[in-house]
Image (cartoon, coloured by chain):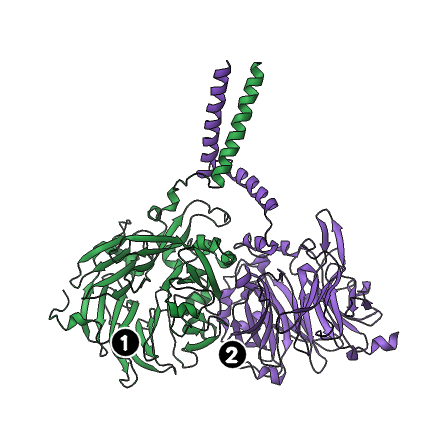
Chain colours: A purple, B green
Amino acid sequence: MNRWFFTLIIAVLVLGISAGSALIRFDLPLSNSLRGAFDAGKTVTSDGFEIKSDIHTLGAKPSGPYDFISPPVRDMDPGVAVFDADNVQPGYTLYTPFFFGNTIRLVDMFGISLHEWSIPRDAYIGERQDGFDLGDSSLPMVSIAHVYPNGDLLIVFSHGREKQPWGYGMAKIDKDSRLLWTYLKQVHHGLDVMPDGKIIAMVHTLRAEHRPGLEWVTTPFQDDFVAILSPEGEELSRVSVLEAIQNSAWASLLMYADPDAYEGDLLHLNSARYLDSEQAAHIPGAAEGDLLISLRNLDVVAVMNLNESSIKWAARGPWHMQHDAQMLANGNLLIFDNRGDSYRGGASRILEVDPQTLGIQWRYPTASDDPLYTVVCGSVQRLANGNTLISETNNGRILEVTRSGEIVWDYRIPERYITKGGELVSKAWHAERIDPAALPFLSTAN
Amino acid sequence: MPKSLVFITLLACLFLSVVGGAFVTYLEMFPRILKSSDSAGSAVPQDSLSGALSLLGRNHPALVSSMQKPEFDTAEGVLRYDETRTWDGYTLIATAANNSSILLIDMDGETKYQWPVPEELLQSADPGFGAGELASLSPPTIDAQLVDNGDLLLAVNTMAASTNGGGIGRIDRMGHLLWLYQGPVRENFTITQNGSIYALLRVEHTQPWRGLEHIPTPFYDDELLVLDSSGAELQRVSVLEAMQNSPFLYLLQYADPARNGGELLHTSSVSVLNAQQAALLPGAAENDVLLSLRQLDVIAIMDPLTRVIKWAARGSWHLQSDAYVLDNGNILVFDSNGDLANGGTSRVLEIDPVTLAITWEFPADTGESLLGSDSSGVQRLPNGNTLVADAGGARILEVTSAGNIVWEYRLPQTDSVKPGRGRSRVASARRYSIDAPGFLVNSSEMSP
C-alpha cells in the first residue's frame, strides 16, 4: 500500500506539473488567473521606480477619470524639505490645493501661511449663464488663482466630478473672500490677464451636432473656446478653437485628433496666454495680442488670432499631453511636458524649446532618478533670477530648480487626507512665485 | 490510512503541482517551447483592402485628402537639370507597379539598364494576388541596391495586397535569382561594409504578448533580420522585445493597432551605425541600428546584441518613412505627413539628435510640395545635395541645401497603371557615382 501510494503521488505530481506548465504555455483556460496571481506577487516584491511601473502598464490606454485619483504620498513629510536661501528667488508662493478646493494659500519660503482665501458659497450657487445643470452641487475645486495688489483674487473652479465637461466657472473675490462677480460658464484650467486688465478665460462645451468638415467626429464632442472678459467679468468676445483651426492653413492639425477621444475631448485646450510684441517677434507669423495656446490632446502648441479667428502658427514636438505653455523673454517656449520624457520612461519634464527649430534648449530633470511626474495638470514659471518654479500637481509638491538643475526649494503641501488606501496628498494644481512688493495689501491689512 | 485522507492528499498534490508547474513555466525556467505564433510564416490572411488602407495610416479625412494623387500631367522624364549644381551619377529606380522593374537611368533620364523583378519574389500565398483590381490598387513596393557586376539586392514588400509573399533576394544582371529569403519583409534594407544585409520582417502574433496583454490580437511586431551575403539568416531581433527590455516601452502609448490593421510599430527603415556616426549619437555604439517606428512617430536606436532600445525620440514628424544618420551626426528623415503648415503633406527634415532641432528642411517655404508615402526615401549626396524619392508624386528630386531643385525626374506612364489613376509610384531611388556601375562599360548588353 505504501509503495503504491508513493508511486501514485509521484505520478500525480508529474502529471500536475505538466498540466500547469501546459496551462501557461498554451494559454489554456485558467492561465490568465494564474498569471494575474503571479504578477500580483511580483508587484509586491519588486522594489522598482514607482513611476516607471505605472507607465509600463499605461500602454495605449487613453486618459480617463482614473487620472484624477490622488496617488499615495510619495514624500512623507509635509513642509519645506529643501531651502537653499542663497540661491532661491525670494518671494511668496500662491498655490491652489485642488482637493481642498475651498482654501487658496499664500505662503512664505518656510511654508507659513501669509494669507488664505476661500470660495464664498454665492460664487457657485445661483443661476448659470449656460444652463449647465449639475444638480445638487458638490464643493467646487479651484484650479488657478490670480492675485491683484489689493488682495483681490481671480479664481477658476471646476465641479470636480467625473462628468464632462468639467469646467464650472470663474469668480473674482476680495481679500476677505467676499464675492465681487461671477462668470458662470464652463471655465476651466488657467487664465491670463492682459495688459489692459481684460481677462482671458477658457470655456469648453459639448456640441451635439456634427460640425461641417468634421463629420468623422463622433457626437457629442467637446469644443474649446477662448473668451475675453472685461475686468468686471462681462464676456466681450468668444472664439471657437476648433473653428479657428478649420479656418486656417493649419487644418491638418486635426489629423491628430482622436474621433473616439475620452468623452469627445478632441483638443483639450489647457492654456491660453497673451503674447506681447516682444514675445510675438520670436514666433513666425505671430503678432502682439495673439494668444499662445496649448492643445493637450493633439500634442500641439499654437498661436491663435482672436480677431480673424484663425491659427497663425503651430508646432507638434517631442512633448506629450503638455500643460502651461508660455513664451519667455529670451524667445524660447517654456512647456510643462507631462508624459514626454523619453529618457525617463515617459515621465514629466520641463522643456525650454526654440520655436524656430523646435530644438530643446533646456530641460529639467536631466538625472534619471530625479522624480517628476504628474499625469494631469502641472504648472511652470520662469523666475527673475533664471530659476524655474514647478508644480508637480499629482504629488502635491512645488519645487524651485536652478538653471543647472539643482533643487533649491522643495515644498510638499500639507493638505493631505487619510483614506482606506492610506494617506493621500491633495493636488497642487498651480503655483506662482510673487514678489512681495507686488502684494501691498499684506502690509496694510495686518 | 483512511481512503478519504489518501484522496485529499492526492488532490492537494495535484493542485500544488499544477500551480507549481504553471509558475515555473511562467518564469520560463523550462526550455522555451516555440509557440506557433512566434514564427514569421504563420500569418493568417487578412482582408486585403483594409490592409492596403492601413498603409495610409489613420484614415481621417484630414489626412486622406492631403494624400490625393497629383493631377494627371503628361510631363515626364527629366523636367529640370541644372548641370552646374547636381551631383552627377546614375539613379537606380524601383517602381511600384504590377510589372515592376528596376531602372538605372543617367542624368538625362536615359535608361542605361533594366532588370525585371523575378516572379519568385512577387509570389504570394494569396492566389488572388497578381491579377485584377486589387493588385493594381496595391502594387508591391521594392527597394533595390546595386551590389557589383550588375547584381542587385531587392527587398519586395507585397503586404499591401497580401499578408504573405515577398522577400529579399539577389539577382544577377540577367535577372536570374541567385538566392531568395522568402517572407513578409518591409521594403527598406541596408548593406553593411562586410556585405551582411539588415532588413525588417513583419511578424504576426495571434496570442497576447506577455506583459502587454492589453494589445489586441492579432497584431504585427517587426523583427530586425540580419542575413549574410549569401542570404543565410544570421539573427532576428524582435523590436517589441527590445522595447520591453528598455525604459522606452512607454512609447507604446502612441500605438493604435486597432485602427491600423494590427500594425503596432510599422518599422519602416533600418540603417547600421558606423563608429563615426555612433560617436555623435547619445549612448550609441558601432553596429547599433537606427530604426524608424512609423506608427509611433518615433526614431530609435537598438542594440541587436543585447536586444535593447538605447535611445528614442519623438518629434515634429508624423508617420515618417525613412530615417538614417548622416556623417555629421544629424538624422535625415522623410517625414511623410508632418508638414502641418501645408495640409499634413510630406517634407524632408534634418534633425539634431541631441536637441531634436530641425537643422534643415525641404520644401519649407519654397512653394514646392511632396506627396510621400511609406515607401518614400532620402539620400544625402557627397556634395551636400539631397536626393528625394517622392513616391506619391511619382518623381525624384535632387535638392540643394538652399532648397533649389536642380534635377527632377518624373516616371513615365506605364501600361499597368489605368488611365486617370496617375503614374506608378516611385518605390525607391538611389544615386550611384559615375564609376559605380562598372559593368556597363564592360557590357554591350542592355536589358535582358
Q: Which of B221 and A195 is in front in this view?
A: B221
Look at 70% across and 55% down and name the residue there: A73
Counting from the top left corner in percent of width and height, residue A325 is at 61, 72
Counting from the top left corner in percent of width and height, residue B400 is at 35, 81
Q: Nearer the viewer, residue A41 or B315?
A: A41
Q: Quadrant of residue A61?
A: bottom right
Q: Disc 2 marks which amino acid? A: Gln
Q: How crowded is mark 2: few (under 14 residues within 10 Å), some or many (20 or more)?
A: some
Callout 1 touching callout 2 (CB < 8 Å): no
Can residue A246 be seen by looking at this rendering?
A: no
From the image, tell me which residue sits under label 1: B409
From the image, tell me which residue sits under label 2: A356
Counting from the top left corner in percent of width and height, residue A103 is at 79, 63
Q: Is residue A316 left or right of residue A178?
A: left
Query: Is disc 2 on the same chain as disc 1?
Result: no
The numbered disc on residue B207 is none
Name the element at disc 1: strand
Q: Which of A41 and A31 is in front in this view?
A: A41
Q: In this view, does B107 lie to the left or right of B306?
A: left
Q: Disc 1 marks which amino acid? A: Tyr
Name the element at disc 2: loop
Q: Which of B99 and A405 is in front in this view?
A: A405
